[in-house]
Amino acid sequence: MFLLTSLLACLMLAVIMPLLGRRVLERRIVFVDLALAQFAATGYAIGLATDSSGPLWAGCITLLAILAFAALPYASRLPKEAVMGAMYAVAAAAGMVILTQLPHAEGHMTDLMFGSLLGAGYGDLAVLGALGALAVLLLRFAGNDSYTQRTMFYLALALAVVPAIHAVGIVLVFGMLLLPALAAWRGDANGPVWLALLVAVSGALLGVTAAEHLDLPPSSSVVLALFACGLPAFLWNARISMASE
């Protein structure tokens, strides 16, 4: 299979990201993963602009964002989504300003949004797997609403998100986090974890296969496949929720 490493990267994310996405939906902080992803992308942009380590810059900037976000309790009356959405907009604008100063700016922007899934190598897979496993482990210590536990939760997100952006781009990271978890959402709580994982794995397989045989952009193809695989479950759960009201 020509896109073997791309498929393996997507399957790895399909196992890790829905577990994190369920926690994001549960806490009603959907924008946090997009904001963290954009902060990481801005770090990569700084690395490109300064001809230095993009992952190092991404990690440092994302860590600062984690410490700031963790200061906002889940139960705060301040609208968390608005704060995180605003920070996403600021980080996105900063990243664009940096990238427009570089030659071939449009290509760099596309790489950050849609990643280089075709170029994912076995080294990338090793990093994704190791940091993703650590992220899932940290979820065990991120259950309550203390500053330390909020920091652990956001750190878990960042450990999974930062390397994934480099491999697959912001769009696929966001899709893998939310689409499977949303498909399994029931009423006002998380549905079965197996359903979210099934949607994620099915979407990864279908999307990469379609990309290979139909010559489609892999990241975009996987996101659309996630949507298609998750839509029946989402509509069924939504129907049940409305019927019970």
Image: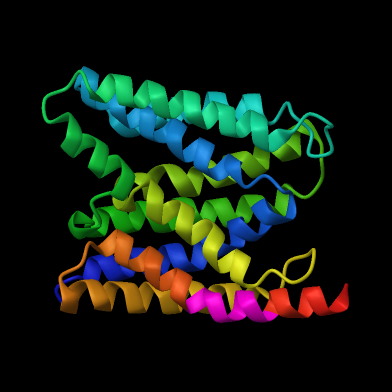
Q: Position of residue 77 (x, y in %)?
A: 84, 31
Q: Which residues are magenta?
A: 229-236
Q: Quadrant of the N terminus?
A: bottom left
Seen at 46% across and 67% down, the residue is 14
Please tell me which residue lies in front, 3 or 103. 103
Seen at 81% across and 36% down, the residue is 146
Q: Main secondary structure of the magenta part?
A: helix
**Quarter location, residue 68:** top right
**Quarter location, residue 221:** bottom left
Seen at 25% across and 25% down, the residue is 99
Colour style of the rendered protein structure: rainbow
Q: Quadrant of the C terminus?
A: bottom right
Q: Residue 14: within the magenta?
A: no
**Quarter location, residue 121:** bottom left
Q: Is residue 18 left or right of residue 205?
A: right
In the displayed structure, 233 sits above or below 91; it is: below
- For the image, the number of numbered tags is 0
Residue extending furthest toward the right: 245
Q: Position of residue 214 (x, y in %)?
A: 17, 76
Q: Position of residue 33 (x, y in %)?
A: 55, 44
Seen at 51% across and 37% down, the residue is 36
